[in-house]
């Protein structure tokens, strides 16, 4: 059997070490970002002790200062997105609205909250016009969406409390960077009437699935 040159063996060892290091680094990077994107399942298991959520003080689409304490006594459905979002946000909000419609009067025990991750463009007027399209329904059938915006630091602090990731990307169509998209976590967070984390609903959940899970939790509570 021919002998393998020593220099060739050394090269193989070096290559294996580099490859292992790259794989470890990739996994490490994914571990850092993964908490903002849980596994894609219809509804996460109950986890009232999870470190998700916290106090916030933001401004709604009508110019009213709102805090998390304003929603005590109701479940909160909290979703982070932005009005220029091309697909995920409108799809998610439409599914959420349909699920709430299916609950009938029980939906009045839930506060659907949309928090922008794009406060630079999402003014109060922009949020008001955007969310109105998801509130087209008979009066009193279900609660309206509460749109919240604020300063960039206020949004960043709130997103951090909910473990929400977001990152802007310039589209390159303008020199001043006016056109950009934002990658962001696509989960909806369900918070208890006491403001504690209950569960999350992943992107892609069906309205029937969300409605059934919410009905179960409302009945239990």
Image: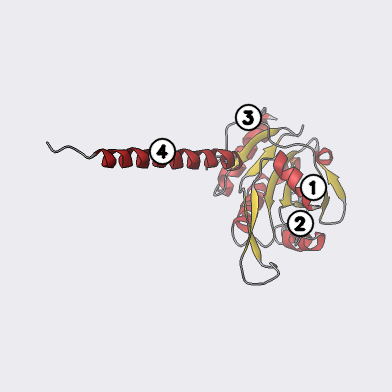
In 3D space, how far apart are the residues under numbered discs 3 and 1 (Cα atoms)? 26 Å
Tell me the CA gap for discs 1 and 4: 40 Å
**Marks 2 and 3 close (CB-CB < 8 Å):** no
The residue singled out by tag 3 in the image is 47
Write down the residue under mark 4.
20
User: Which residue is the site of mark 2?
Assistant: 119
Give the quarter of the figure containing the C terminus.
top right
Label 3 crowding class (10 Å Cα cut-off): few <14, some 14-19, many 20+? few
Pointer 1 residue: 154
Say above or below: 11 vs 167. above
Instruction: Indicate which label's residue lies in the foreground, 3 or 1.
Output: 1
Residue 114 percent coordinates (x, y) = 72, 51
Label 3 – label 4 distance at C-alpha: 35 Å
User: Can you name the residue that lies furthest to the right here?
Assistant: 64
- The image shows residue 66 at horizontal and vertical percentages of 84, 46
Q: Is residue 134 left or right of residue 211?
A: right
Q: Nearer the viewer, residue 13 or 178?
A: 13
């Amino acid at each position: 059997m021919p002998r393998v040159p020593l220099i060739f063996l050394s090269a193989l060892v070096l290559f294996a070490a580099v490859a292992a290091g790259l794989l470890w680094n990739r996994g490490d990077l994914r571990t850092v970002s993964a908490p903002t994107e849980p596994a894609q399942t219809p509804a996460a298991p109950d986890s009232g002790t999870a470190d998700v959520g916290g106090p916030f003080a933001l401004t709604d689409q009508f110019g009213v200062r709102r805090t998390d304490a304003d929603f005590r006594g109701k479940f909160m459905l909290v979703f982070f997105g932005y009005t220029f979002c091309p697909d995920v946000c409108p799809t998610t909000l439409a599914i959420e609205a349909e699920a709430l419609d299916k609950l009938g009067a029980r939906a009045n025990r839930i506060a659907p909250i949309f928090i922008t991750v794009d406060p630079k463009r999402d003014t109060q007027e922009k949020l008001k016009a955007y969310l109105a399209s998801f509130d087209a329904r008979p009066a009193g059938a279900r609660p309206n969406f509460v749109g919240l915006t604020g300063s960039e630091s206020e949004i960043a602090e709130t997103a951090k409390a909910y473990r929400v990731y977001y990152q802007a990307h310039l589209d390159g169509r303008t020199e001043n960077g006016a056109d950009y998209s934002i990658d962001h976590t696509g989960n909806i967070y369900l918070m208890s009437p006491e403001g504690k984390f209950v569960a999350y609903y992943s992107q892609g959940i069906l309205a029937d699935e969300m409605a059934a899970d919410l009905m179960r939790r409302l009945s239990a509570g």
